[in-house]
Image (cartoon, rainbow, N blue to C red):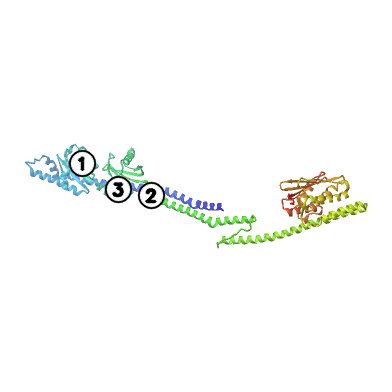
Amino acid sequence: MSRLNRQIFLIMIITVTFPLLIISAVLYFNSVHALKTEYESSSQLILTNLSFNIDQYLQSIEKGTITALMDDELQLALERWPNTSLENEEELRLRYETEIESFVGTIEVSIKNVDSVQIYVGDRVFYSASFNRSDYNIGDFTQEEWYRRTIEAGGRVVLFGTHKPFHRVNALDSVISIARVINKAGTKKALSVILIDIRLDSLREILSKSETTNRSFIILDEQHELIYASDAAMDEQSIQAITAKLAQQQLKANDTGHFYVNIDQVKSYVNYVDSSYSGWKVIQYIPVNEMIKYARNIQGTIFALALMSFITALLFFIILHKRVTKPIIRLSQQVKQVGLGNFNIKLDSSRNDEFGVLHRGISKMITDLKQHIERLSDAKVQQRMTQYGALKSQINPHFLANTLETIQMKVIINGDRQTSEMVGKLGQLFRTFIPSGKDTQTLLDELKQLRLYIQIQQFRFADKISYEEDLAVGSEQAVILHFILQPIVENAIVHGLEPQLEPGQVTIRTLITQKHLYIYVEDSGIGMDEAQLEQLRSRLDKPVDLIEEEHIGIKNVHDRIRYYYGEPYGITIDSEKHKGTTITISLPYIVEED
């Protein structure tokens, strides 16, 4: 029954849990693939739009600087201010200075998120009016790297990534800068250099439309120097990992692309777009786990369902064991005890379901069976006693008829002393048949009766019959059933010795082994062939009323022994044609106590 429980449990696991796990795996992998594909497509579109917006913003700044090329008054001021003497033309110098500072203020107002605007003319720097000039330390700016790069660009816009303002003292916030040379209109003559510092808020505002807690952005310049990072805590090692991958991608001359790399020791998806205007790389990255978190949610849900189905199967298994299997196992054990003969088993159950009905039904069946067996046992005892009495009584008339026939023959032939002696022996023998109230006697007493019978037969057949005893030590005191040897010896004489012409012998031998007593009745008569022997053996197990009178004596003795001592005991027959027959009587070895 426990195997049945396990089978039901396994069936539930196989039919419910396993399919859910398989579905979970298939859905998970399909969802991961779909999410990755969708994310890659959408991310590339978003990134392209962001790069375009950044370029638009930078171009708007560049357009603001072009005003300086188109404003004649500003061109004149930039060209003449360095050459105007402060002593001779103070009014004119002030007018040029005012024109330059007005232009600086206009740039600051017209462009969003401008941190500061500086115009370098000759050896002087003009600042936005809103800044305190004492915060700046100019020095020889013409020798600075940024200035030389701008001059070398010859009028083209030069972009500088995230840095501290070049001349501002103790600056805290970083900026990005755009610088260019302002040439004289129609020529390549440099009049001044304009430097516009832009707060990082400008890039942050553009990227904020796509920045979430899950995705982050990096902007690198053409030399892969960092311009902006939305995650200020991003370590240098992660940036190097990205730039190394970008270097591999550049070998393929791709303006856009994507790859996977570990960022902060987390596998991440990275895609990038190269700006055609600024040459910057706008890079977006997100942990792979965040990309596929919805797939993981689906997988987790199905795993939860699978776990619930497993727990349900386990609970069902426990309930089945407690409510069904365990009572059935207990009931089967009790029924097995009943089968072994223990009818004192109590089958009680307080349940009102089918199991309760089953317990009460089997309990009533056991009670009825016990009563039936008791009645049957009583009837069997009565039947055996009746059969035993009938078998015992069947022997005496048969023997008496044969004996009287012998006496009759002797009286006719001889008639005196010998006949008288024979009749006396017969009287002694009859007296041994008188019931004593006991079914058993010692082997010695049984042999005394047998010897009287043999003497009578020797009167009848003279020297044709001889008799011997070969008894094991201690066997004479063994207790055996009354009157079991004489019928067998009689059968040996009548069917074994009497039909042959030459003299024959009957021998009684005994053997004691452990708890058994074996009595062997051997004759040297005509014996039986195999067919006759098998036929006689089979008759021993047939009912009494089916046995012909020829072998009734052996059958009676066999049944009496079986009735009295049980199935393991009785008679076995061995015989060989023309050599004789041996009847073996198997009895329990019981010694009469004094």
Residue in the image at 10% along x and 45% along y? 95
Q: Which amino acid does label 3 sit on?
A: Asn
Label 2 neighbour load within 10 Å: few <14, some 14-19, many 20+: some
Q: Closer to the camera, 128 or 330?
A: 330
Mark closer to the chain start, 2 or 3: 3
Q: Closer to the camera, 385 or 90?
A: 385
Image: 434 above or below 99 = below
Q: Mark 1 points at which residue?
A: 166
Residue 550: image location, x then y, percent:
82, 52
- Judged from the image, the secondary structure of the residue bearing numbered disc 2 is helix
Mark closer to the chain start, 3 or 1: 3
- Judged from the image, the secondary structure of the residue bearing numbered disc 1 is loop
Q: Closer to the camera, 345 or 515?
A: 515
Residue 11: image location, x then y, percent:
52, 52
Q: Distance between the residues labelled 3 and 1?
A: 31 Å
The quarter of the picture where residue 435 lies is bottom right
Residue 274: image location, x then y, percent:
30, 42
Mark closer to the chain start, 2 or 1: 1
Q: Which amino acid does label 1 sit on?
A: Phe
Q: Mark 3 points at which residue?
A: 49
Is 328 on the left or on the right of 548, as rendered?
left
Question: On residue 496, which mark appears?
Answer: none
Q: What residue type is labelled 2?
A: Lys
Q: Is residue 24 visible?
A: yes
Q: Do the residues labelled 3 and 1 touch (CB within 8 Å)?
A: no
Q: Name the residue under label 2.
A: 293
Q: Closer to the camera, 303 or 206?
A: 303
